[in-house]
Amino acid sequence: LIPSIGDTTPLHSLPCRLSWRVPVIVVVMGVTGAGKTTIGVLLAQRLGWEFVDADSFHSPANVEKIRLGIPLDDADRAPWLRSLREAMERWSAEGKNVVLACSALKQSYRDALYIAGQTRFVYLKGSYELIYQRLRQRHGHFASEAILASQFAALEEPGDAITVSTVSIDRSENDIVEEIMHTRAADGGPKGP
């Protein structure tokens, strides 16, 4: 809809008929045990998007180190981050909307994963005690208390960047997903498929 010459209707009140389809990648981040996979799967289901777990990008050597309780260092994580970034660029080129569960503990990691205009981070924030209790109740996950401690030590909490939403995990999974949906919608982010 294009206003005619002499029309005094403010442009912001005219209905927009153009739709720009930009793929979005929501990175659900936090330490092990924060609920990245659970919340990421629920969020992806609500949005009708694909869900991907960054743990599946780790090399067998990294998985073995984690299983043995040996914290990963930046050298261990570098190829993992490169693989994730390549996948994110591929999803972007294919026009895919994706929810990615990824620790993204350090700002440098988030910088490596960030694609301008397309990447949003959701930081699942919880206390060490709460997350440790959750980890003790989990079965079949390869992370240990030593890994949790090392991740809290390495964690650089995101600031109030426009691309990051911080969500407290001290409530139900559905409440967490609702808050993410509400926050993303309020900032012009994705509301659905």
Image (tube, rainbow, N blue to C red):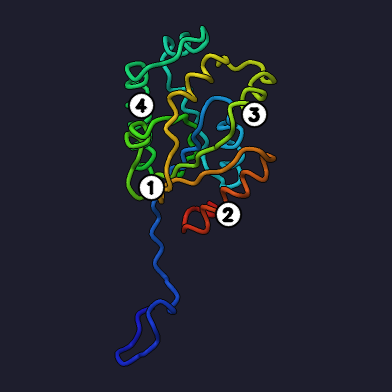
39 lies left or right of 59: right
Name the amino acid type tagged 1. Gln
- Residue matched to label 4: 81
* Residue 144: numbered disc: none
Which residue corresponds to mark 1? 118
Tell me: residue 133, above or below residue 113. Answer: above
Give the CA distance from mark 4 to mark 3: 28 Å
Kindly report the distance in space between the C-alpha atoms of the residues bearing marks 3 and 2: 24 Å
Q: Which residue is mark 3?
A: 130
Evaluate if marks 3 and 2 touch, with contact meaning CB atoms under 8 Å apart: no
Q: Amino acid at mark 3?
A: Leu
- Along the line of sight, which residue is nearer the eye, 126 or 66? 126
Mark 3 closeness class: few <14, some 14–19, many ≥20 residues within 10 Å: few
Most foreground residue, 33 or 140? 33
Q: Amino acid at mark 2?
A: His
Q: Earlier along the polypeptide chain: callout 3 or callout 2? A: 3
The residue type indicated by label 4 comes to Leu
What residue is drawn where x is 67% and y is 23%?
Answer: 133
